[in-house]
Structures are given as structure tokens and as C-alpha cells.
Image (cartoon, rainbow, N blue to C red):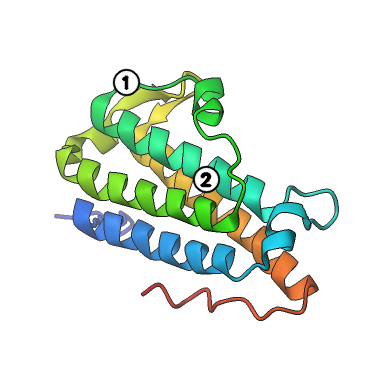
Amino acid sequence: MTDATASPMVAVSKDELLGHWQGHRRVTRRVLAAFPEQEFFNYSVGGMRPAAKLAMELIGMTDGGVRGLASREWDNVNEMYAKYPMPGTQAEVLQMWDRVTEQIDRSWPTIPPERFGEVDKAFGVWEGRMFGIFQYWIDNEIHHRGQAYVYLRALGIEPPAFYDRE
């Protein structure tokens, strides 16, 4: 007999999770590429950081995060940021983004599915179940991408469709 009030379990495979994340990363990359060079580094609204600084945060968190998820060895939060000084051009930032995407693709197969249920302390700061921390990385990217959408619209630039994750 089952309890009619119990919620059914919904699960996705590790590969489906990766596909979801990479879809968000493809959209974010297109958003970053839509900026004119000067505005990419300097434009902000309401005191928020420019798109280039948002991108560098995401690059550092993603690279260090996927390595820590795979190896259980974490840079501390200051090392995470120090590893990625600001490049001089938008193209260099996008190249870094692409290298991190390649790192994800290399590391992902080494992460056992049960790792997402383990508790760890990411970057020496954020302790929790790895699935929740991983979800935070995606949420943080979406949040910063939303800021970049506002910048593009304020600049009179039509941003890429958020739902086109191909």
C-alpha cells in the first residue's frame, strides 16, 4: 500500500544533468559574446559589476568547482579568483570560457553519480550536499546572465533567446 500524499521520486541521469548545465553555458556564452568590446569591460547598471567581471567569476567557480567535484580537492575561495586574472580582450575571456567547457567535458565522466549525494566543503567555504552546491553554480550563472541581459537591453542590443540552449 502506498501513501497517496507521498511525492513520486523524479530523477535525472548524470548525463542529463550535464546536458542541462551545458545548455545554460551555451546561452551565457552567446550573451557574453553579444557585448561590444568596450561595454563588456566597463558598462554596468545600478552599481552591478560589468559583464567581464561576472564572466570571470563564473569561469573561476566553474573550473574550480568541477575539479573539486571530481577530485574532492578544492582551491580555497581566494585561490579560485586569483587563478583567473582579467584578460585584456573579450575574445580572451570567451576562449577561457571554452577551455573551462572542455575541462567540464573531460572531468564529468570521472565523477561517480553518488558523489552528488556526498557532503563536502566547496572552496573551503560552502558546506553541503554536492548536488545542492552544483545547483547553486547553475543558479548563480543564471542570475549573472540575467544581469547581462539587463545591460544588453539598456545598450539597445537584443539579447540571445534564453530558451535556445542549443
Q: Earlier in the sequence, mark 2 or mark 1?
A: 2
Q: Can residue 132 be seen by looking at this rendering? A: no
Q: Vertical placement of 109 versus 83: above or below?
A: below
Three-letter code for the amino acid on which mark 1 is drawn: Glu
- From the image, which quarter does the N terminus lie in? bottom left
Which residue is at a point 44% across and 53% down the rendered structure image? 95
Please indicate whether residue 129 sits to the left or right of residue 111 in the image.
right
Q: Which mark is residue 73?
A: 1
Which residue is at a point 43% across and 46% down the rendered structure image? 135
Which residue is at a point 58% across and 57% down the rendered structure image? 90
Tell me residue 53's x, y (percent). 65, 45
Three-letter code for the amino acid on which mark 2 is drawn: Leu
Q: Residues within 10 Å of mark 2 (few under 14, many from 20)?
A: many
Which residue is situated farthest in the right direction here?
46
Element type where label 2 sits in the image? helix
Which residue is at a point 72% across and 67% down the rendered structure image? 150
